[in-house]
Image (cartoon, coloured by chain):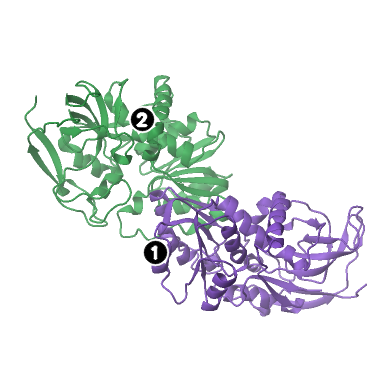
Chain colours: A purple, B green
Amino acid sequence: MPDSNRQWRVADYPGPDQPISKAHFAWVSEEVPEPAEGEFLVQTAYLTPIPAQRGYLDNKQSMFLGESLPLGAVMRGRGIGKIIESKHPDYSPGEIFVGSLGWQDFSIQRPLGNDFIFSTRKITKPHAPLSLHMGILGQAGGTGYFGLLEGGQIKAGDNVLISAAAGGVGSVAGQIARIKGAQKVIGITSTDKKCAWLCNELGYTAAINYKTENLDKKLAEYFPEGIDLFLDSVGGNILNTALKYLAMHARVAIGGYISTQYSSASSIGPGNYYNLLFKRARMQGFVYFDYWDRYDEAEQVLSKWYDEGQLINTEYLIEGLENMPTALAGLFTGRNRGITVCKVN
Amino acid sequence: MPDSNRQWRVADYPGPDQPISKAHFAWVSEEVPEPAEGEFLVQTAYLTPIPAQRGYLDNKQSMFLGESLPLGAVMRGRGIGKIIESKHPDYSPGEIFVGSLGWQDFSIQRPLGNDFIFSTRKITKPHAPLSLHMGILGQAGGTGYFGLLEGGQIKAGDNVLISAAAGGVGSVAGQIARIKGAQKVIGITSTDKKCAWLCNELGYTAAINYKTENLDKKLAEYFPEGIDLFLDSVGGNILNTALKYLAMHARVAIGGYISTQYSSASSIGPGNYYNLLFKRARMQGFVYFDYWDRYDEAEQVLSKWYDEGQLINTEYLIEGLENMPTALAGLFTGRNRGITVCKVN
């Protein structure tokens, strides 16, 4: 039994427009806690930073994926780990557990079932490595899966656009769109290297480097018949430009708005929204956790595709709990490629 | 048989931000045309100006409710009239016809069926006055009906917000929402007099004068549990403010964007669109003519409600073809109240 529990705690709130960094967290160590009746102790194996976690360091309530955290709190974050000690009749040492473990080595847990971002689940048939359950079979995969199927109502033959295509969700969603019979899948990302990766390894039809290419012209070129489905987690100018190129009855699935979410420019909206009227199109927000009761379905389907080699793992592995702040920061600078996963123990 | 055909022709294009007026039209008279084989001559009874007609005087293509018109063309507009002379086997003198008659006394027509804004239809059971078929039983009623049922997926118990509530569509839609079992129906309009009209005669629960009241505060007050359905034809600041107050799974039905459509400020978008994500809500564009093949259904239902006294006629009658430019202009200044209809012959 280990005798210390390393933790990252919230030390400071970054202001709007200020990049998040290690400076906003404090690295502490405390004793490993003891489970009470009905609880169990979990040792963290992997954590997954996602852009929404930045919101926990907003000093206003984020109202979205959980409230902001007070200074001094252990940083919130979902992970997968092994049960070490249990005082719950249905949970035994050695079993694999997914939940809101926090940025720490150990945490006291209890089964919360379908409780939005605190939803928990026992993994009865663990894949190796366990990180898969936090990646293509977990939140990134599930967000792509439900984003396309429910948010975007994907149909075979659709011409699909995906923003943040080399990010966690985009790197799985592009593959899912292809598997579901999309006619073309175009990705938007921030470097030529990522563009090549999307096309050569993930089966994207083409990719646009929005930093060096003219997005407007490229969309006109790639979508002469319009965009049927746009999976967007970026917002801002990318969303607004894409709205110009909607096909009739297009569906825009909104899974995030990272370009403006933490910026003081957040009041700039998509002026081209009126094209929803011209094209009788739809813009629909969706959140992965709303589909937690369909986790089995997503996991089964995604596992099958993975086992058949149709879906490849796009994990971007970072080693060591000490590197979690850097892992989170990398989501905003475009440094990470694919699904960022941190190996903790 | 009359010997002259009075017409309004397009004489000039108003610039962006410039109000439309009589100065943009030329009043001419020509001979009454003769139908060829397969055609018939219709004498216009009523015309209905709608905001979208302003788009026909844009010198860019409007891509929405029909292309813009060249200078010198007879102004486009839908109307109802009587067949005077026919060279079509299925259409006889005396029958009542709805179609794109234009701003004129007489027009040559042929049956076009479901042809978007040029859709035609014979009225086999005419109501008196015929203007009803251009109002609550016609485009205004149909837009409210399909906007709420299809665009907005209205459900009993919904808390409903309607912008331009004292306009043609809004004055019917508020009544339909009430009939369909909405818990409350709040209207937004531009004068206290119209507010009183909405509440006292049309059954709106309450109304907001957006020119003198604080819309943000009023929406917070009227929608403590959020807006379930927002039928919007205004856009701009009204849409953006309403987006703040969406309930979970809200539906925003976009039927127009009159506040910015003809203005150079059209690039300002709804910055609060991200609330679609927070509330897993939907914004959906809809257009009446897409449901032309369900015209029978809408007419039947609306007629029944009208005959039962559940739905009252909100017609704003203007007399004389010579007043059509003023009738259209009045849609943009807030002068007209209800469904603007012009009696031509």
Q: Residues within 10 Å of mark 1 (few under 14, many from 20)?
A: some
Query: In terms of image quadrants, where is residue A148?
Result: bottom right
Q: Position of residue B95 (x, y in %)?
A: 24, 22
Q: Residue at x 35, y 58 (%)?
A: B266
Query: Please, which chain is the residue tagged with disc 2 on?
Result: B
Q: Of B264 and A293, which appears nearest the observer?
A: A293
Name the front one of labels 1 and 2.
1
Q: Residue at x 78, y 74 (%)?
A: A344
Q: Amino acid at mark 2?
A: Ile
Q: Of A305 and A116, which appears nearest the observer?
A: A305
Q: Residues within 10 Å of mark 2 (few under 14, many from 20)?
A: many
Q: Which mark is residue A342?
A: none
In this orientation, does residue B249 appear?
yes
Q: Is residue B154 above or below residue B261?
A: above
Q: Which mark is residue B136?
A: 2
Q: Secondary structure at mark 1?
A: helix
Q: Of B92 and A51, which appears nearest the observer?
A: B92
Quadrant holding the N terminus of chain B: top left
Q: Position of residue A55 (x, y in %)?
A: 63, 66
Q: Is residue B295 above or below residue B330?
A: above
Label count reads: 2
Q: Position of residue B208 (x, y in %)?
A: 43, 43
Query: In terms of image quadrants, where is residue A51?
Result: bottom right
Q: Secondary structure at mark 2?
A: loop
Q: Residue at x 27, y 30 (%)?
A: B98
**C-alpha span from label 1 to label 2:** 41 Å
Residue ID for mark 1: A220
Compared across the picture, whether B185 is left or right of B118 comes to right
Query: In terms of image quadrants, where is residue A175?
Result: bottom right
Q: Position of residue A22 (x, y in %)?
A: 68, 79
Q: Amino acid at mark 1?
A: Ala
